[in-house]
C-alpha cells in the first residue's frame, strides 16, 4: 500500500495582511502533480485544511476544486480528510455524502458510539484508522487502542494498518510554533506516545509543522509537517511524505518530497539579530528580483525610531520582496535577572509560562496540581471560543 501523507495546509492564511493565494495555488498544483506521478492508493490529509474555522467562500472553492483535480489525477485512490483544530468539524461533515461519490472520506467529528465510522478498509491493500481533532477530555481513555483492537479483529489477511490523528505528542520538536511548550502546542495538550495505542504500522500525525519521526516509535510515528511555512520561525524544509507498506508488521518506507514556495519567508539577518542600522543595510542590499516576505530581527536597547516602518517600506520600493514586520529583542543590561519584555516577546509567551512567572514572583510554588488546574481553565476557554465560532456558522 502506498500512502500520501500531508497535513496543515492552512488554506486562507494571511501573513501580515498579505494573502497567500499564489503560494497555496502553487502548493496544490505541486501536490496534484506528485499524485499524478506516484499514483498512491491512499491520500491522507491529517487536519488543518483551513487556517480558520470560517474560511471564505473563495478559499473553500480553492480546496474543493483542488480535491477534485487530485482525485482526477488518480481516480482509484481513496482520499481521507480529517478535521484539525483550526477547522470546523461540522463543515467537514456537511458534504460527507456527496464527497463519497469521488471516493473521498471527510471526517469532521469524533463518533465514540460508532467507532467503525473511523475505520476505512482499502480493498486488498490495508486499513486506515482516521481520527479527527477533538478536545482531549472528549476522547475516552483507551479510545485509540479500542480502534486498533477492532482493526486487529478484522485484519485476518495481515494487511498494513495506518492510523492518522491531529494532535500533539510528547517529545515532538515544535520549533516554529507560537504558543508552544512541553505541555501544549497550539492549544492542544500533549499525549504520550503510548497513549496512542499499539497495533499500527504507521502513525500519520498532523498539527506540528516540522516533519519528524517521534523518538521511541521505531520510525513508525511521524509528523509529515506542513507543505508551506506559516511563520518566519519555521526555517526548516517543508514537504509531503509517501509511505509504502506491504504487510502488517513491516517497517514503513518513507520518502519525503519537498514543496517549493514561490514566496519564501526571509529573516534579516538570517541568524540572530543586528542593530537597526545594520538591518537597514541588509534590507537595502536585498536583491530586487527575488520574491519574499521579509522580517527584520532587530536588537534594541531603547526604542526604535518612530519612522522605522516607513523606512523599511521605502527600502523595498520597486523590489519583489514584501516587508512584514520588525521583530525586536531587547539587549540585556547588566547582570540583573529582571527583564522587560517587548510586545513581540510577550506575545510569544505561553499563558502557563506567564502564570508560572507570576507565582514565582509572588513566592508561591507552582506545583503540578496548580499547573493541571490552570491548563483545565485554558482548555475550557479555548473550547468555549471554538464552540462559539462553530455556532456562528
Image (cartoon, grey):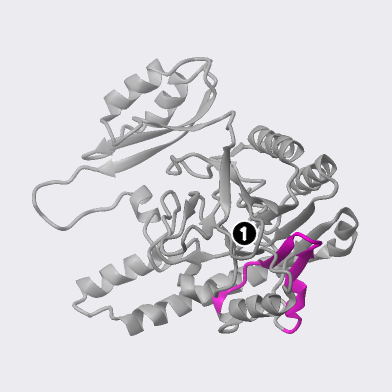
Q: Relative to the observer, which residue lies in front, 122 or 116? A: 122
Please tell me in which quadrant of the rendered image residue 352 appears.
bottom left
| Quadrant (top left/top right/bottom left/bottom right) for the C terminus | bottom right
Residue position marked by numbered label 1 in the rendering: 86
- The foreground one among 138 and 296 is 138
Please state if 135 lies on the left or on the right of 185 as rendered. Answer: right
- Work out whether residue 191 can be spotted: no
Q: Position of residue 236 (x, y in %)?
A: 45, 41
The range drawn in magenta is: 113-136
**At x 45% / y 43%, what residue is drawn?**
234
Q: Position of residue 109 (x, y in %)?
A: 71, 71
Q: Residue at x 67, y 76 (%)?
A: 152
Badge 1, how many Cα within 10 Å: few under 14, some, many 20+? many
- Residue 282 inside the magenta-drawn segment: no
169 versus 312 height, above or below: below
Task: Left or right? Give the position of 233 relative to 329.
Answer: right
The picture quadrant where one finds residue 184 is bottom left
Q: Where's residue 346, x and y in %? A: 35, 55
Amino acid at each position: 500500500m502506498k500512502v500520501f501523507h500531508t497535513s496543515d495546509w492552512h488554506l486562507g492564511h494571511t501573513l501580515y495582511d498579505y494573502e497567500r493565494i499564489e503560494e497555496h495555488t502553487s502548493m496544490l498544483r505541486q501536490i496534484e502533480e506528485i499524485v499524478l506521478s506516484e499514483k498512491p492508493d491512499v491520500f491522507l490529509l491529517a487536519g488543518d485544511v483551513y487556517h480558520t474555522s470560517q474560511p471564505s467562500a473563495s478559499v473553500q472553492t480553492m480546496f474543493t476544486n483542488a480535491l477534485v483535480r487530485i482525485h482526477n489525477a488518480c481516480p482509484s485512490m481513496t482520499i481521507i480528510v480529517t478535521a484539525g483544530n483550526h477547522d470546523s468539524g461540522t463543515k467537514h461533515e456537511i458534504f460527507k455524502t456527496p464527497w463519497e461519490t469521488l471516493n473521498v472520506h471527510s471526517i469532521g467529528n469524533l463518533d465514540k458510539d460508532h467507532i467503525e465510522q473511523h475505520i476505512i478498509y482499502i480493498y486488498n491493500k490495508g486499513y486506515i484508522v482516521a481520527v479527527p481533532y477533538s478536545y482531549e477530555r472528549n476522547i475516552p481513555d483507551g479510545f485509540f487502542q479500542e480502534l486498533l483492537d477492532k482493526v486487529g479483529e478484522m485484519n485476518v489477511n495481515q494487511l498494513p494498518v495506518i492510523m492518522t490523528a491531529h494532535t500533539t505528542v510528547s517529545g515532538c520538536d515544535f520549533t516554529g510554533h507560537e504558543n508552544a511548550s512541553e505541555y501544549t502546542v497550539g492549544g492542544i495538550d500533549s499525549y504520550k506516545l503510548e497513549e496512542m495505542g499499539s497495533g499500527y504500522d504507521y502513525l500519520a500525525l498532523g498539527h506540528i509543522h516540522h516533519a519528524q519521526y517521534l523518538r521511541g516509535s521505531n520510525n513508525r510515528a511521524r509528523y509529515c509537517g506542513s507543505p508551506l511555512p506559516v511563520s518566519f520561525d519555521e526555517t526548516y524544509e517543508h514537504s509531503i511524505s509517501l509511505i509504502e507498506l506491504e504487510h502488517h508488521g513491516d517497517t514503513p518506507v518513507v520518502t519525503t518530497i519537498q514543496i517549493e514556495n514561490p514566496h519564501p519567508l526571509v529573516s534579516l539577518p538570517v541568524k540572530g539579530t543586528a542593530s537597526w542600522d545594520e538591518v537597514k543595510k541588509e534590507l537595502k542590499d536585498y536583491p530586487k528580483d527575488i520574491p519574499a516576505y521579509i522580517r527584520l530581527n532587530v536588537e534594541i536597547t531603547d526604542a526604535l525610531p518612530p519612522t522605522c516602518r516607513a523606512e523599511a517600506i521605502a527600502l523595498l520600493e520597486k523590489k519583489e520582496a514584501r516587508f512584514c514586520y520588525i521583530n525586536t529583542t531587547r539587549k540585556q543590561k547588566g547582570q540583573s535577572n529582571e527583564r522587560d519584555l517587548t510586545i513581540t516577546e510577550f506575545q510569544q509567551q505561553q499563558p502557563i509560562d506567564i502564570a508560572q512567572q507570576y507565582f514565582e514572583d509572588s513566592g508561591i510554588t507552582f506545583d503540578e496540581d496548580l499547573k493541571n488546574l490552570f491548563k483545565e481553565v485554558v482548555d475550557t476557554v479555548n473550547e468555549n471560543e471554538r464552540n462559539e465560532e462553530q455556532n456562528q456558522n
